Amino acid sequence: MAVLITGGYGLLGSWVAYYLAKDGKKVIMFDVALREFDYLEKVKSLLVPVRGSVLDWSGLLQTFKKFNSEIEGIIHTPAIMATPGYWKNPYQSTTLNITGTLNILEMARIFGIKKVVYISSGAVYGEVKDKASEITHPVRPSDLYGASKASAEFIGFQYQNHYGIDFRVVRPYFFFGPGRLPSELPPIFRTLFGCIEGLSNLELEKGADQSLGFTYVKDTAWGTVLVYRAKNLRYKTFNIAAEKAINFVELVEISRKHSSSSCKVKIGPGKLFPRGETLDISLAKKELGFEPKYTIEEAVAEYANWIRKNKNYLRENQ
């Protein structure tokens, strides 16, 4: 049997695929762009690449017809993130986040696939001052991106109620790491990690007074795999994030430390996001046994090493 990952070659999807395939699971990698990553080489024999979009209904039907007898579950990752690109194209972005999820849920219903894990976001909590918990904090998004992710969650749980689909939600928080260069990431990541890649013009209007729970993608991916594998869950929604937040300026200094070249980074005073510093992961720890394995220092060091080895190849093949 196989797991189908939409956005299989994305930053998170590719690492989820790695962990599943490492344990011998066949993974169908459904994505608009098929890419090659060094960390997938050892498990490549278990990966089945399929080019396609979650908004292409006919393409989805063909894929699910072809692999229907093999697919035991779906992990749905594609989304337009809360970046300037989202606000410039709100209709297109929101359509992908909501309709893309709806299309996958329909495929699950039509083809009798009983498990769907949806990658949501900590943005569904909106503006909070403490660590948001799945149990104590309501879904109260404060922007369109958060609203799109929350909407997809609500739709998914109604598919569970009406059609018996085992719908599970992962709420990650500001993850980064191997799979994307800083230059390929949203502005906040490009600025904070850009020194490692040797980028210039690294600047944020605000953020010097903000700390966030930046999470290594390998931790986020492992948490997602635990959510997928878990049996007899009492809860269906889990925060997967770093326990400790780090200040933007401090993170830049760590990036500088692991950079092979000097660079200048300008971050203005104030906060860039009206979000809590990180998410409460006590439920994931208790119910799933999830523990972040990487400190921020370890994560940046490993990320920097990956960038040095892969940046030239990735730039040439973007």
Image: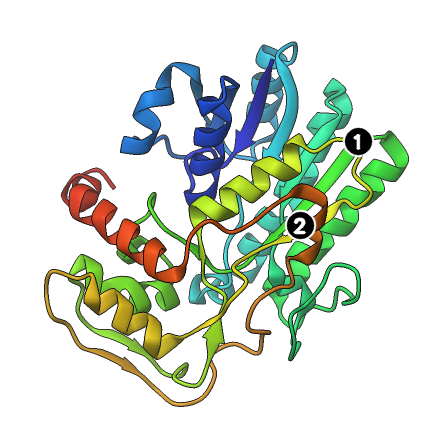
Res 156 seen here: yes
Residue located 65% across and 63% down the image: 280
Disc 1 marks which residue?
165
How crowded is the residue under tag 2: few (<14 C-alpha within 10 Å), some, or many (20+)?
many
Q: Position of residue 109 (x, y in %)?
A: 77, 26
Q: Position of residue 276 (x, y in %)?
A: 59, 74
Q: Quadrant of residue 77?
A: top right
Q: Nearer the viewer, residue 77 or 318?
A: 77
Q: Residue furthest bottom?
A: 269
Q: Please, what is the three-letter code of the amino acid marked with disc 2?
A: Ala
Residue located 75% across and 38% down the image: 167
Q: Quadrant of residue 66?
A: top right
Q: Which comes before the other along the chain, label 1 or label 2? A: 1
Q: Quadrant of residue 249?
A: bottom left
Residue located 86% across and 30% down the image: 163
Which image quarter is the N terminus in?
top right
Res 152 seen here: no
Which image quarter is the C terminus in?
top left
Q: Residue furthest right?
A: 162
Q: Position of residue 197 (x, y in %)?
A: 19, 57
Rendered position, 71 above or below 237: above
Q: Nearer the viewer, residue 22 or 189?
A: 22
- Mark-to-mark CA distance, 1 and 2: 21 Å
Q: Please, what is the three-letter code of the amino acid marked with disc 1?
A: Ile
How crowded is the residue under tag 1: few (<14 C-alpha within 10 Å), some, or many (20+)?
many
Rendered position, 90 above or below 212: above
Left or right: 229 in relation to 134? left
Disc 2 marks which residue?
284
Helix, strand or loop at mark 1: loop
Q: Nearer the viewer, residue 308 or 85?
A: 308
Closer to the eye: label 1 or 2:
2
Left or right: 85 in relation to 123? left
